[in-house]
Image (spheres, grey):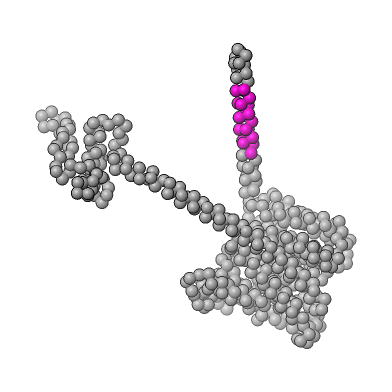
Amino acid sequence: MVSTSASQSTGQPCIGLEPLDGKNTLLPGKTTPSGGTGRGPFTNGGPKVTDNGVHDIEDRILRITGYYGYNPGYSSHRREDGLESQAETPGSEASVESQSYQTCTSTVLKVLGGLLMVLCISSSWVGTTQVVKLTFQSFSCPFFISWFSSNWNILFFPIYYSGHVVTTREKQTPIQKFRECSKLFGEEGMTLKLFVKRTAPFSILWTLTNYLYLLALKKLTATDVSALYCCHKAFVFLLSWIVLKDRFMGVRIVAAIMAITGIVMMAYADGFHGDSFVGVALAVGSASTSALYKVLFKMFLGSANFGEVAHFLSTMGFFNLIFISCVPLILYLTKVEQWGSLSSLPWGYLCGLAGLWLVFNILVHVGVVLTYPILISIGTLLSVPGNAAVDVLKHQVIFSMVRLAATCIICLGFLLLLLPEEWDSVTLRFLATIADKKSEDHGEELTESSLHTRSRSRANGTVSLPLA
């Protein structure tokens, strides 16, 4: 081995070479004649570090001989490891490529699933609105329809639990899953006091939203009501800005102004009188209560997962069945809404309407988890042209220019509200990238033209000199 010692005569350090033992004649990492590997000073496959910071025999020899390009601590075993890592590079590149391929595939599938979700959401909402119009032809009791449809929310959690059983390996009993999702109400779970305190305001807002929407459908066409209902997005922004102190965005203020402008134009279409004005007021009231419901949900319950939302909607369905069932009974006794006999009710339309409404709510909440939330909003917006197509083709509705302009303004404001918060900086960076690319292309063209000019001048025996 190589050793460093101090000279006893001069007191200066000197370096001497000691004879190598038979046991240590091989450098680390080299194979022995018997086929083994001489580890030497290595322990557990790594270098043994001495007190002076030198790692192993080879490092000492390279330091003594002054090997060109030698760096202390970089010996053959590190170079061999580097070669091995370089040998492993193609495999790592293949793994990176496979990961990128999987990422692209998942993104494409997510986008395609989102587009399918958009079509399903718009179709279910168009179907709900049109079935309501058909139901009103034989059964004009909007509160009973709203109450009956809200009771179907009880099925939300059973449907969620069925999907949970099918898609997960770790099975939980319905009671265990119900208690797990009850943490939305607090760490102690759901108590009777919390059930009434948390569920009552949301259930009332839910009922008002549906009831006002159905009343508006009695006064206006399905296209007008669905367009006016899209204003709830602007109301959500205004309430979030005021109550939740969300970020101020000028473009969303413009979108809110456009929504209000569309509402005024829609009311002006028939001269601010008659059923048109009342219908516009009812539709705007439905959009307002819907916005208040969403803002309060975000304020008090936070961002809940899909299981907690399913639990909450089923809880609202129970609250609606227990506490709000007295309201349609009072309306019947006061002859505000006449049902007739139970056998005379259009159960086919009622069940179809309630089922479509339930499917719409399930798709909205599932879509937020499975795909991009912006696609869910676009699906709601597409219900406007969908209802317009049905109104024109089936009901022969003729829209005035004022109503068309109001509908387009509301839809444009809705699209502006879908812009992300960082849309301005992203747009500026995109424009700057395009400008830089154009300048680089222009510089390359100038370089090519100058080279061409120089070659021509040299061919003519002259040289063009740059001006100072």
Instruction: Please name whichever residue, 86 or 349, is drawn nearer the observer in this view of the structure.
Output: 86
The residue that appears at 77% across and 70% down in the rendered structure is 130
What is the total number of numbered labels drawn onto the structure image? 0
Q: What x and y, as percent, mark residue 278?
A: 83, 67
Q: Please, what is the dominant secondary structure of the magenta stretch?
A: helix
- Residue 435 included in the magenta stretch of the image: yes
Q: What x and y, as percent, mark residue 93?
A: 45, 47
Instruction: Please name whichever residue, 180 or 323, is drawn nearer the observer in this view of the structure.
Output: 180
Q: What x and y, as percent, mark residue 333?
A: 78, 85
Vertically, is 326 above or below 384? Answer: below
Horizontal relation, residue 151 to residue 5: left or right: right
**Residue 443 sits in which quadrant?**
top right
- The answer to whether residue 467 is visible is no
Instruction: Please name whichever residue, 448 or 277, is drawn nearer the observer in this view of the structure.
Output: 448
- The answer to whether residue 26 is visible is yes
**Residue 427 sits in which quadrant?**
top right
The residue that appears at 73% across and 51% down in the rendered structure is 254
Extreme residue toward the top, this view: 461
Vertically, is 139 above or below 414? Answer: below
Horizontal relation, residue 36 to residue 306: left or right: left
Instruction: Please name whichever residue, 341 or 457, is drawn nearer the observer in this view of the structure.
Output: 457
**Residue 53 sits in which quadrant?**
top left
The residue that appears at 59% across and 74% down in the rendered structure is 159
Q: Give the magenta-colored segment's residue range.
A: 434-452
**Figure quadrant of the C terminus:** top right
The residue that appears at 78% across and 76% down in the rendered structure is 135
**Figure quadrant of the N terminus:** top left
- Residue 83 included in the magenta stretch of the image: no
Q: What x and y, as percent, mark residue 272?
A: 87, 62
Horizontal relation, residue 264 to residue 436: left or right: right
